[in-house]
Amino acid sequence: MQVPILKQGPFLIATIQAALTDADLEQLRSALLERVVRFRSLGVIVDVTAMDVMDSYASRILLQISHMIRLRGTETVIVGIQPEVAFAMVQLGLTLEDVPTALDLEEGLAHLQQKFATGSGAPGP
Amino acid sequence: MDIRVTSDKDVVHARQQGRALAIELGFSASDATLIATAISELTRNIVTYAGSGVVSLRRVTGPTGLGLTIEAVDQGPGIADIDRALRDGYSSSGGLGLGLPGVRRLMDDFRIESGPGRGTSVTVTKWHR
Amino acid sequence: MAKDKQESREATQPVGDAAGLPRSDTTAALLRELVAHLRQNRNLLREEWVVRIVEARLLTAMTREEIFAEATSVYDSYVEALETGTFEALQAYARNLSERIIPRGVETHEVVGIVLLLRDVLARSLFAKYQADFEKLNRILDAYEPAANRIANTVAVGFVQERERVIRQQQEAIRELSTPVLQVRERLLILPIIGVIDPQRARQLTEQLLRGIRTNRAKVVVIDITGVAAMDATVANHLVQTVEASRLLGATVIVTGLSPEIAQTLVTIGVDLGKMNTVGDLQGGIEQAERLLGYKVGPLG
């Protein structure tokens, strides 16, 4: 299943809509990288609201996306992690350390807008 | 319920079946997520290290009540140093190495049998609170 | 204890042979006689019992009328148990009574006390009645005592079981109550943790907080652990996981009231305190939270 990626101004929004296989996740990683380059995006939001499981593999791919994109000066925000999913993640030791997170899409966009409006970038939560 | 695991699609299928069974057995949404996540980790280990295997999901009864047991069995190369594999930060495929210790934390009971050339069998149980 | 058992074993057998008495003079017959006596003197004995209860300052949470009403029911169930040798009715009554009096603060020793008093009142009345016939008095007491012990035991056990059930229920309720997630300002939650944290409570607390973050759309959470005296490594790990899980939902956690002992535990299990957002006290934590949220910091309204 392909993850739709929407361009909204200087930002890209990838909305995961169903459970993803490893191959789907890898496909998302290359698609996002390609588009960040193509559109010179300032920020990327990955909306994982629909993910009911975030295991070590999915978490690793999200970290890779964030780190690779950061090399181009672009910030990734992961939004919509569900409470139960977060609980299971920390039991597994998956904390997505140093990747900004936000409650939902709206919050994620607010975070990016604030960061790029002030230029230097306010530290996100 | 036995599910044959040979690809990443089976990983998704197995954890969805596991979540459905957990809900059916009356586990909370939170516990069902822990169970589904454990299944995801165990079946991915099968795909990554052994290529194929079987995961069984079973309803069990113990002294404290109902439980759900996951048994992941493969005929892969097996694990030479189990103690080491159960320590955080170790993985023979160079990944994050959080698989087995993490699964152990997600579940209540944990048992592993493995050895070089003998395949691997991991049995874990979550008890109804 | 061993003596009691022996007594009850003897009591179930005809005591006649050894004493050279007629076979018909069995325990059952003695108990029948006893029951008849207790029925005949019901009003008198019941009244005396209530006086003794009041004198002994038992059941102080109840009025004299209430004590009298309950005493009547207990007395009748008691006599019935002696008569029939079955304890189900008494047991049911004991449970029902416990259910009613436990919420009023009646203690285990009071319930045991009143049953022992009744035993005493009845024994005294048997002394008075049979004092002329010492041998018969002895046989009556032999028949009465094991039954009386069993009754006292039944009532006390029924009470304790009911009390335990109530305590378990209350503990559940307290668990829920003692982990309140408070919203003090828009997008700001406070979680004051008080008391002992065990792994089960730690987990409940985390789940409650995570749901709270989602429903209140919180951006900052202040977890105040001033009220937590001690924390072992397992619970400290839970605290760290709570902080990490909250961040995954997009909320920043500030931990306040960290005692030097708990800080030591956290360092011992390998927590980098530099990465954890800690502030000395709750007030300071709220002020920092308000700064993070962009509020002008002033005294709490």
Image: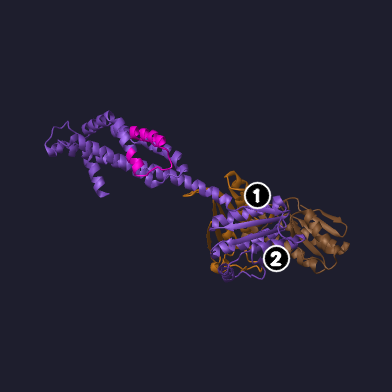
Chain that is coloured purple in the picture = C
- Is B93 located above or below residue C116 in the figure? below
Residue C68 in magenta stretch: yes
Judge if badges 2 and 1 mark residues of a common chain.
Answer: no
Where residue B9 appears, as percent x and y from the top left, is: 69, 53
Q: How crowded is mark 2: few (under 14 residues within 10 Å), some or many (20 or more)?
A: few
* Residue beneath the point at 21% across and 39% down: C141
Chain that is coloured orange in the picture = B
Kind of residue indicated by mark 2: Glu
Q: Mark 2 lies on which chain?
A: A
Q: Majority secondary structure of the magenta segment? A: helix
What residue range appears in magenta?
C51-78
Where residue C245 appears, as percent x and y from the top left, is: 66, 59
Q: In which quarter of the image is residue A29?
A: bottom right
The reply to whether residue B2 is visible in this rendering is yes
Q: Which mark is residue A97?
A: 2
- Judging by the rendered image, the residue that carries numbered circle 1 is B16
| Relative to A31, B17 lies left or right | left
Q: In which quarter of the image is the C terminus of chain A?
A: bottom right
- Is C105 located above or below residue C244 in the figure? above
